[in-house]
Image (tube, grey):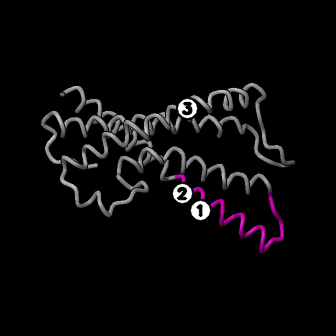
Amino acid sequence: MHFLQKASELIDWLNENIGSGISWLNLLMIAVVCYDVFTRYFLRKSSIAVQELEWHIFAVIFLLGAAYTLKHDRHVRVDALYNTFSPRTRAWVDFLGSLVFLLPFVVLVIWASFNFVANSFAIAETSPDPGGLPARYLLKACIPIAFFLLMLQGLSMNFRAALVLWGNGGEHDA
């Protein structure tokens, strides 16, 4: 049981630090959007690269922030019933939900994205638009990385639930 606690703490530490680091990209995205709005509406100039940069930054924030979101229990869930459950029942819901839905899904996405990302690297994929950003394969590489981090956080969630159910985990915090 000590191993589960330590593994969960390590995973939580990793995703906390990645999430905190990624959160700073929000400032960069705000700056890029403000620049895009200013140049487009006041200078009457537009740049495809700047527009692509906006959605690239957003994609990185969304993808790499997913595990952080799960760690802090900010993901989408119907809490109407969950909040009324006892800590032990919540632990069962988290354990089984992660085991049956989350973990198989992330494994499937990682597996399915492998060729997608590998092909992108093989052809050194860039934007198909003239003036677009190079190295699109780096953005696509975020997909399996993000789902791997999400898988780790799902395992951490399962470890914590297992500690509540079979160990001495005390109160269950999702």
Residue range of the region highlighted in magenta in the rendering: 25-47
Few, some or many C-alpha atoms within 10 Å of disc 3 (few <14, some 14-19, many ≥20)?
some
Give the residue at mark 3. Answer: 110
Q: Position of residue 43 (x, y in %)?
A: 81, 71
Q: Quadrant of residue 3?
A: top left
Q: Residue at x 83, y 70 (%)?
A: 44
* 39 sits left or right of 144 in the view: right
Sooner in the amino-acid sequence: mark 3 or mark 1: 1
Residue at the spot of label 1: 30
Please say if 87 is above or below 43: above
| Relative image position of residue 128 (x, y in whole percent) | 83, 44
Give coordinates of residue 1: x percent, y percent.
Answer: 18, 28
The amino acid type, in three-letter code, at marker 3 is Ile
Residue 143 image point, x, y percent: 58, 38
The Cα–Cα distance between marks 3 and 2, rounded to whole angstroms, is 26 Å
As for residue 118 lying within the magenta part, the answer is no
Which amino acid, mark 2?
Asn
Task: Count neighbours of disc 2 (C-alpha within 10 A) and say few if under 14, some if 14 to 19, many if 20 or more.
Answer: few
Q: Quadrant of residue 41?
A: bottom right
